[in-house]
Structures are given as C-alpha cells and as structure tokens.
Image (cartoon, grey):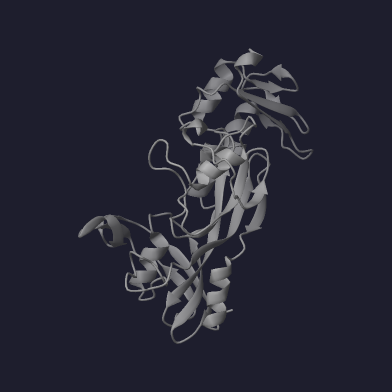
Amino acid sequence: MAADIRWQLTERLRPDQPIILLRQLLHDQWLLPDRLIHFLRRRQHVLVNGRYETMNQPVYPSDRVQLLFCGDEFRTPGANHYVPTSAPQLAVLFENRDLLVVNKPRGQKSHPNQAGEEGTVMNDVAGYLRGTRDGAYMVHRLDLETSGAMIVAKNPVVVPVLNRLIAAGEIHREYLAVVEGQLTGQGEWDWPIGRNPQDPRWHCVNGLHAQPALTYYTSLAAGPERSLVRLRLATGRTHQLRVHLAHSGHPIVGDPIYNPNSPEKMLLHGATQRLIVPFSFKKIQIAAPLPPYFAQYLVKYGLN
C-alpha cells in the first residue's frame, strides 16, 4: 500500500483538543470535503496513532493523525501541467509544508492559459519546488497588472480547505490602490457587478447577470489629484475593486480597462494577506512589501 501513496500528511492534535469523533475532526474542524473523507474511509487511509480508526471513533488531545492520499481522490488539475521555470525569481513571503505565499509582481500572469505556456507565477512555483515531492496547485489568482500576496498550494489536499476559508471570508487580502481625485473617509460599496453588455469580456455595476458585491474602503491620504485607499473584499467578483472604484468616480491610476485614459501603469497592490493555516487554523498576517515604483509614486503625490 505504501508504494501507492502520493501524499502523507501527519498532524499532532493540540493538548487542548476537544474530544470529538474522527469524522467531526475531518469534516467540521479540518474542513475536508466529503469526497476526500469517503476515500479515507473506504481505503482505510486515515490512521490515529498509527492504526486505522473508523469515523465514529473519538480522537483525543495529542493524538497523531495521518492522512494518506494516492492522487486519484482529487479533481484539482495536476501540478505537472505547469512547465517549471529553470531559474525562478520568486519572492516567497511565507512557506510551510502545505502552501506558499508569494509576492507577485505587476505584469506577470498568475497562471498559464494554455498548455506549454511559461513565465507565469505558477511556472515559477513549479520551478521553485522542482526536485521535491511537492507541486504547484492553484488557489486563487491576481490580475495581470495587480501585484501582491498570492497563495499557492503545494499539495491538492489543502486546496478545498483554503477555498472554503476564502469563500467564508476567513482568508482575505487588504489592498492598497492609488486612485484618481480626492477620495476621503471610509465606508462600503455594495453595488452588484455583472458582465458589460457592450463588451462581455469586462464588467460593470448592474451589468448582465449581476451578482451582489461588497467592498470596504478607507482613505489613507487624499490630495487634489490622487488618493491612497485601503480596500478589502467581502465578496470576490471578477475585477470587483476596479469596477467599484471606477463606478465611485475614483478609478485606479493606470487601470487599462476601467481608466483607459490614464497613461501610467496600474497601482493596485495586495499589501497584506490574512492567512488561516490548515490544519492548525492558526491566524497569521503576512505583509507584501510595496514595489519601489509604487512607493515612489506615493512620494511624488505626497501620499506617503
């Protein structure tokens, strides 16, 4: 059996772990989907202190729990689809057994759009991990012209866990943006976002098939021409920050789609990543340093 195992994750439960059923640990506490729990049970690939235990058995503080996976349990596209970068220049902000947080530069794609494509963040992560048993697995993406913190999973086990935490708003980024005009105060925008009827590649407020969207904003510095604003997504619609800022009358400086007359390059940066780490569920805050051009722009307009 061991030769068929592709991933083996071992966790030691905390001394203050509540006594609960193994199924509750896997589903409710660790947020594993039913599909994975089904395979663990059917194949007897969940071990407690080295022995298979049924899902109705309790687990206790300081127990050692092992999860064994062969690979066919997952629907996540394989890491081998990414051509590894030979000498990746990857800015790693955080790394543990299961994931990386990297500082994506502006102008680099998050992932390939076709087989064999190179030069994306996912290619770089694949190159960074080459020679290990880990791979690059997509969790979320940043737009081409957006920089900042981006999570990449190193195994497919944690992908659905991270996705559930992101969907629940437990994992999120705070962004910094330089916008046109004088934006002051703080508040929220709850304008629904849908497809632009004139160009379905893009989005707009109250567009086709609009869905609820909520953005929180805080002005950090405001001048007559430009303002620096901190943003947090409560929902994750495509281009949400860019669409909401444009609709507010304060489009992002350099946004090629929603502020096409701006000659600069886009100034939107995922500055901090609130991360909840599977399977300890420890909360950590990760800072992604501002790119030099962004910091220089703040000085130029007195927004620093």
Note whether residue 201 is visible. Answer: yes
Q: Residue furthest bottom?
A: 224
Residue 58's x, y, as percent?
A: 69, 26
120 or 68: nearer the eye? 120
The quarter of the picture where residue 173 lies is bottom right
Residue 189's x, y, as percent?
A: 40, 68
Q: Residue furthest top?
A: 1
Note whether residue 153 is visible. Answer: no
- Measuring 42% from the left and 36% from the top, which residue is drawn there? 116
Judge left or right: residue 182 versus residue 133: left
Where is the N terminus found, in terms of image quarters?
top right
- Establish if 66 lies above or below 256: above
- Measuring 41% from the left and 70% from the top, which residue is drawn there? 252
- Measuring 51% from the left and 24% from the top, which residue is drawn there? 73
75 or 164: nearer the eye? 75
Where is the C terminus found, in terms of image quarters?
bottom right
